[in-house]
Image (tube, rainbow, N blue to C red):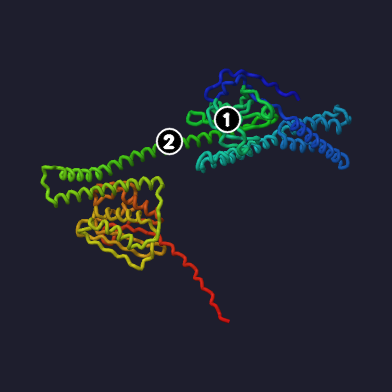
Amino acid sequence: MVPPRRSLVPTGPPSTAHGPDPTTIWAMRLKLPPRSTQTVRVWGITAVLLGLVTFAVAVLEGPVGVPNASATYLLAVVACAVAFGTGAAIVASIAAFVIYDFMFIEPLYTLTVGDPGEWLNLLLLVAVGIVVGRLAAGQRDRAEVAIAREREARALFRVSRGVATRTATADALGEIVSIVRAETGMARVWVALGEPNGPERTVADTTGGGAAIRPASQAVLRRMPGDAPAQWVRVHQASAPRTGRREAADRAELGYRVHIDAGGRTLGSLWALRERSEPEPDPTATRLLAGSADLIGQALEQDRLASEAKAAEIARQSDAIKTALLESVSHDLRTPLATIRAAAGSLMDREAHLSAADREASAEAIDREAEHLNRLVTNLLDLSRIEAGALRADREAFAVDDLVDRTLDRLRPRLAGLVLEIDLPPTLPAVFADPVFFDQILTNLIENALKYVPPGQRIRIVAVLKPDAVRLTLEDSGPGVPEEALPHLFEKFFRAPQGGRRSRPGTGIGLAVVRGLAEAMGGRVEARRSALGGLAVDLDLPLAPIPEEPPVSVAPTEVEG
């Protein structure tokens, strides 16, 4: 068999989007000859089938006595049609005609037929054999197409499922290249990202991290307009001379390349490697390679869009936080600063004749507002540490009443005019807490209550023992907050509305700091409606571990002899 001639066709300048590299000079359409071993196998099996049927005909027309057993050759024709297709069936029909004429029609062992009726029988044998063979071959072809389409659909489903269920496209590429390699029969499949004519970076490879290569001899898939099937176009990339094993591999292997496109851009390539002696990918394998490249491209484009959307959302939230921070802090900064400046101006005014009581009041105002500024700055710094995950608690075992008394002693002047109820049983076990964090938590909770509780109303601090913690509850008899606002109280910059009115001025970070500090100590905090009518905040503090008692050693007693 003479292999078909390959015609070289100059391709002209390469396409900037999907064409070969700038070094490409010639391209040729791939037309590989059929494999000689496959041809020998087909004709060998056909000859064996004809031989077996000829033996059966000889037995039927000899010892059995069947007058004309030529129809038995239809078995060989049908078998060849089912196994090898229409061409083999036609050849088997003609061969059966010749063999039966040569071996069973008088005169024997010649191709001469004396009886015209025998000619009719032989011609009918050929006609029926061709028709039956064609029908059987058509059924075989349809079955093969159905099986190939089913396999292609299953493979594309597995690829699309890997893309659809991915957490990141890079995680799914390894499974995709393995599926493509198994279904197309390629020796190696890999995905490389980068510009079409520039360097590419391998991100998934069936060889498990093999060296990134770009074969000198490539077959690039050219997409055709409309429904026309894509075509493989052979290109040769002129590159630096290669020696040794790589040069030998280039001579023995042929690379197949499918561009990965999305959003009007080429993102990279899906590469496949196969021996030069192997035929080009069939239509099923070609569609699978093209479909996989398209799915990868769409997944990468979705990742890019998701990343851009996430960046835009982060920028939007950052702007919103900055705006909320400025709006929240501006009032709390301006008010104490204005008070401090007014009081300091009165003290500095030489013409103002202030009494000792007025000077003391101005000094107290400066100290009070400076403390307020200090609390504001401390909350802002703690919030930034909480957001950065840099908050570390230095926990020790403390009695709950000791922790509470320290904070109340410092804040007692601000609680004047309110009814303060404290219920801290002395039998409560010690808790595991950071005293600095606890002081700031209780201070923020009390200051939050002071904003809403008018003079003469009640604030109650209660502690009870839970199975794994001590629950400290601070509740007030203020107006409370709407039920729908309770889950959001500990969010940054959230200020609950009061009775349909706008929220009161404040930074909205005090309770957010409370939650961050509580969680840093291993505790938790929740808000609910208070039995007093206002807001109740439950702070759960973990129990302190009970220290192990050292073993008691007993000195041996001496016995006098």
Observer-nearest residue: 212 or 378? Answer: 378
Give the residue pinned by disc 2: 308
Q: Position of residue 426 (x, y in %)?
A: 34, 67
**Where on the picture, by quarter, is residue 128?**
top right
Observer-nearest residue: 44 or 34? Answer: 34
Badge 1 marks a residue whose secondary structure is strand
Label 2: how many Cα within 10 Å (few below 14, some 14–19, many 20+): few
Q: Position of residue 326 (x, y in %)?
A: 29, 41
Tell me the residue at 28%/48% (across/down): 374
Tell me the residue at 65%/23% (across/down): 241
At label 1, the amino acid type is: Val
Q: For the view shown, which residue lies furthest in the front direction? A: 561
For marks 2 and 1 on the same chain, the one whose residue lies earlier in the sequence: 1
Q: The N terminus is located in which quarter?
A: top right
Give the residue pinned by disc 1: 258
User: In the rendered image of this protein, does residue 328 appear above or below residue 252?
Assistant: below
Please say whether residue 502 is visible from this viewpoint. no
User: In the rendered image of this protein, does residue 382 appear above or below residue 297?
Assistant: below
Badge 2 marks a residue whose secondary structure is helix
Q: Position of residue 451 (x, y in %)?
A: 24, 52
User: In the rendered image of this protein, does residue 379 appear above or below residue 246?
Assistant: below
**Residue 559 horizontal side relative to residue 516, left or right:** right
